[in-house]
Amino acid sequence: MNIAHRIAAALLLVCGLMQPQSQFTVICAGGTFPDPIYQNWIISFETRIPGAPMMYRAVGSERAIQELKTRAVDFAASDYPPAGQVQDELGVCLIPTLVGAAVPVYNIPNLSVNLRFTPDVLADIYLGKITRWNDPRIAGLNRKASLPAQMITVVHRSDGSGTSYVWTEFLSQASSHWKNAIGASPMPSWPVGQGAQGNEGIATFVSRTPFSVGYVEFIYALRAHLEYGWVKNPAGAFVQATIDSITAAASTARPKDGGRISIVNAPGRDAYPVASFTWFLVPLKIESEEKRQRLSEFLDWALTKGQREVAALGYVPLPQAVAEQERTNLTKLWK
């Protein structure tokens, strides 16, 4: 190494030593649905606002809440709002971040039309009451479809999941039998079907299994190029999940509710009926002032510039009024 190279190397070493080194990482665990956008947010945020690193682990909503209980993570992300008592035990504030939707995906070879489903038909498929694709109740909704007599392979989540919570909330509203026997839950006792881990697990299972049906978040159906059905909403219209139909459901939320209310079966002819907000669960008490500051910067960024990146990845941003209300709430979070 010549003298010039030695001087350059020494300068680089000195400059490296002079750079402030972060002593911590802000860690979040959460659902698989928002994983792609949250990973994208972290990269964009750290590029624009340098500081302590952020990390997101997609472990499922239920496990994330358990990790937050033990403070194994700094905050969590969930696709369903924990019950009030659980929120009190966790000591958290719920901050909505995105709007999602659960869609019925299926794999029927050589089918040339998109299927239509009513809520009660979906409930009875998951109850095991409808077992074949050519059942009269499915055929009656899809007269142009040549449906096979094949048995339906039902697929559900094997892990605790916010997507499962939204799906079973929808089924509970469709079927009194489902509501009374099973109910809305992130990890219900499924009457029939085979389990798969995460949204990606169900998407992979359905894509590889002819004559199967499952449910995944909208973005995973798009990414896996799966067929997904039109679902009848309370206004009597069959609606397919799209950016516009999910936005129509989200637009029914009131800003003062902060996106905490359910938008399953939201009113409106154009609203997709199996839509939901997803949330960050942020502790009301964080001992480290540095972590509070870094997390505050990230949350504010997510509610502003982060929302502009949402649609590009196939997600639905928060209604502007909800995002603005949450920014106001953030200013009071740790005061």
Image: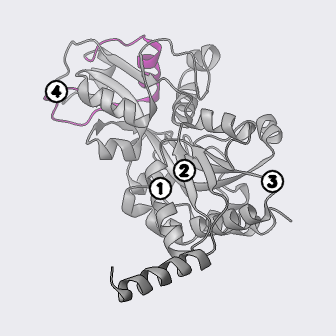
Q: Distance between the residues labelled 1 and 4?
A: 34 Å
Front residue of 90 and 3: 3
**Sooner in the amino-acid sequence: mark 3 or mark 2:** 2
Residue shown at the point (59%, 29%) measured from the top left:
186
Quarter where residue 49 is shown: bottom right
Name the residue that disc number 2 marks: 56
What amino acid is at disc 2? Tyr
Front residue of 241 and 74: 74
In the rendered image, the quadrant that contains the C terminus is bottom right
**Sooner in the amino-acid sequence: mark 1 or mark 2:** 1
**Sooner in the amino-acid sequence: mark 4 or mark 3:** 4
**Is residue 24 in view from this perspective?**
yes
Q: How far apart are marks 3 and 2 (CA)?
A: 20 Å
Task: Please identify, in this view, whether the residue under mark 2 or under mark 4 is nearer the observer.
Answer: 2
Tell me residue 150's x, y (percent): 22, 13
**Sooner in the amino-acid sequence: mark 1 or mark 4:** 1
Label 3: few (<14), some or many (≥20) within 10 Å? some
Name the residue that disc number 4 marks: 109
Tell me residue 284's x, y (percent): 81, 53
Q: What element carries label 3?
A: loop
Above or below: residue 268 compared with residue 197: below
Q: Which region shows up in magenta?
A: 108-133
Name the residue that disc number 1 marks: 39
Q: Do the residues labelled 3 and 2 touch (CB within 8 Å)?
A: no
Q: Distance between the residues labelled 1 and 3?
A: 24 Å
Is residue 121 within the magenta segment?
Answer: yes
**Sooner in the amino-acid sequence: mark 2 or mark 4:** 2
Task: Please identify, in this view, whether the residue under mark 4 or under mark 3 is nearer the observer.
Answer: 3
What amino acid is at disc 4? Pro
Residue shown at the point (50%, 62%) measured from the top left:
41
Image position of 99 (left or right of 211): right
